[in-house]
Image: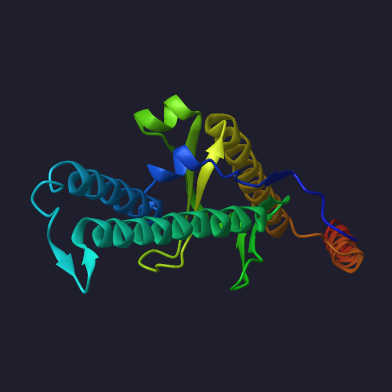
Amino acid sequence: MDKEIKLKLKPRFNFFYEVFMPLGIKFRADIIAIIAGIIILLAINLAGKDLMADTAILGFNLIDALNVVCIVLLGLFALKLIFDIVLKVLQYKNMSYTFYDDNLVYEDNFLNQQKKIIKYENIKEVEVRRTIFDRIMGYGIIIISTNAEGNFRSGLIVYGVEHPNEIYEQINDLVHTFDKEIKNNQKVEMKSEWVQPVSNEVVNNTSTENEEDFKDSLKNIK
């Protein structure tokens, strides 16, 4: 029988938010390269027009040659930016965090498939982090820490979470509810260990021995 799904997270891609995230370094690099190319292209056509107007390389005007090179590079960086965006969108679509009664399952089925199961009993802490930019954009990061300290594979970091405070409360409730159930079960088991049932045989033997002692005491009465 399939387990009941308590919560399912599927982070949604947002380009403007992604650019300022720690993992958005590729986007930032592409954007910086495109801006730098545009500045160089403008500088060549404005400041360098008079200086290199009569200069030629292999029969081509230097200004025209540099313009072609800059335009080609700009096109390549623009294509790379589009390619990176498409890859990220597809990754988000194939990524999910599913929470059940006793564990959570992280799945990433894009390119290199990855699946990770974390039991609630191994979760040490659930944390929400939001920078000023996160709060402006309405996003945040959920950090799930486990007992496997010092291991780079321990825990999970859920990026790009919308309404992070609400999601944090739901995850925290699931983990703590499970923890309370475990502790209650342990208390019940401990109590049951202290209370040992008395068998009928012991009761019968005890009553028989008491009866014989009583009869012996009567014999001594004169």
Marker count (numbered): 0
Which quadrant holds residue 129? top left
**Placement of 98 over or under 207, stated as above or below:** above
**Placement of 102 over or under 149, stated as above or below:** above
Which quarter shows the C terminus? bottom right
Residue 214: x, y in percent?
86, 58
Which quarter shows the N terminus? bottom right
Residue situated in front as seen by the camera: 108 or 85: 85
Which quadrant holds residue 118? bottom right
Q: Residue at x 32, y 54 (%)?
A: 29
Residue 206 relative to residue 81: left or right: right
Residue situated in front as seen by the camera: 200 or 211: 200
Q: How is the image coloured?
A: rainbow
Residue 197: x, y in percent?
81, 59
Residue 125: x, y in percent?
47, 47
Instruction: Report the residue that reaches farthest toward the left.
Output: 51
Instruction: Report the residue that reaches farthest toward the top.
Output: 136
Q: Residue at x 42, y 57 (%)?
A: 75
Residue 142 relative to residue 32: left or right: right
**Placement of 176 over or under 135, stated as above or below:** below
Residue 108 relative to residue 47: left or right: right
Q: Residue at x 46, y 64 (%)?
A: 154
Residue 119: x, y in percent?
62, 59
Residue 221 relative to residue 52: left or right: right
Residue situated in front as seen by the camera: 106 or 217: 106
Residue situated in front as seen by the camera: 127 or 176: 127
